[in-house]
Amino acid sequence: MFKVEAITPAIGAEVSGVSLNKNLNNDTVEKIYNSLIKHQVIFFRGQNLTPESHLKLAKSFGDIDPGHPVYPHVEGFQSIVLLKNDENNKPDTNDWHKDFTFKSNPPFASILHSVRVPKVGGDTLWASMSAAYESLPDGWKEDLEGLKAIHDMGTFRNDFYREGGVDSVNSALKKVGSAVHKVIETHPISGLKYLNVNQSFTRNIVNESQGASDHILQFLFKHIAKPEFQVRFSWKNNSVAIWDNRITQHYAICDYLPNLRHMHRITVINDKREKSFHSIS
């Protein structure tokens, strides 16, 4: 029996009574989607997910990303990102971020499957950007409305520098580019307003001096990090997390080295239900 249990008041729920490896009927897929919209990130236990089932689940939500610009992929599956970290391959995801905000159209969602995780450590945090927005003082809400910010590839500079020095960084910056997004956005399905800046990729507030921009962004980054807006998930082998990248941020804790943490992730570029939702509305 399909069951959803909230984990915190602000964000996160655990879903049980469904096997993601089986052919999911439309009703079950809709229940999963609706749970995701309501809780922003949802979790499943005991899911020995095959790459084929992982892809099929992702495609039920929308078009999938063909491959990450930096990370490797699972052999034979270009669109499944391989996140395999230990003391010889340290992760760079232990920072609050939304995925790909340096793109003009950041992705809708991600589906992360834990293949092998340490007995302790390696948890992931998610934060609700709608809860963070709602708790802002009214004055800050008014001041932020209408502001835009520049996003670029941020901490990925380190990956390109290790690969080929400053020339590689300059080439990547030109290739990847930047994007400008509103500081306050509105979720296209739920209608909730949310904060749309993140520490990894947001660089400057448009039309503000560097000092003023830093003041605004540092305040927001500290505000976002409050535990009241967060859920913490302790992974076990064959757990699955699905999160709405539009309205959440996440932080993968790097406290497990030298142990191995092996994960597979698919990114869903667009929400195929968004178009039909607006046509009905």
Image (cartoon, helix red, strand yellow):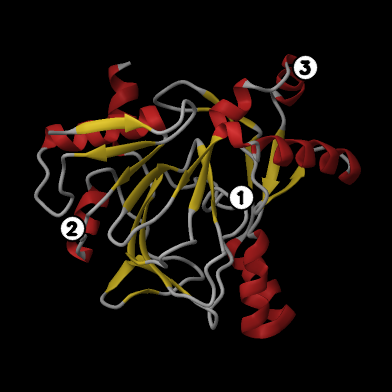
Residue position for label 2? 53
Query: Residue, x 9% and y 39% (percent of image)?
Result: 25
| Residue 222 sits in quarter | top right
Residue 206 in sight from this viewpoint: no
x, y (%) of residue 43?
33, 44
Give the camera-side residue of 213 and 15: 15
Mark positioned earlier in the residue sequence (2 or 3): 2
Quarter occupied by the N terminus: top left
Q: Outermost residue toward the front? A: 119
Q: Give the class, few, some or many, for how many residues have Cα within 10 Å of label 2's Cα (few <14, many ≥20).
A: some
Query: Residue, x 47% and y 71% (percent of image)?
Result: 71
Query: Residue, x 74% and y 79% (percent of image)?
Result: 166
In the image, is 18 to the left or to the right of 75? left
Give the camera-side residue of 218 and 274: 218
Amino acid on which disc 2 is placed: Ser
In the image, is 96 to the left or to the right of 121? right
Query: How far is mark 3 from mark 1, CA to CA?
Result: 25 Å
| Residue 261 sits in quarter | bottom left
Query: Which numbered dot is residue 139?
Result: 3
Query: How far is mark 2 from mark 1, CA to CA?
Result: 29 Å
x, y (%) of residue 34?
29, 29
Query: Residue, x 40% and y 43% (percent of image)?
Result: 243
x, y (%) of residue 69?
49, 68
Query: Which numbered dot is residue 96?
Result: 1
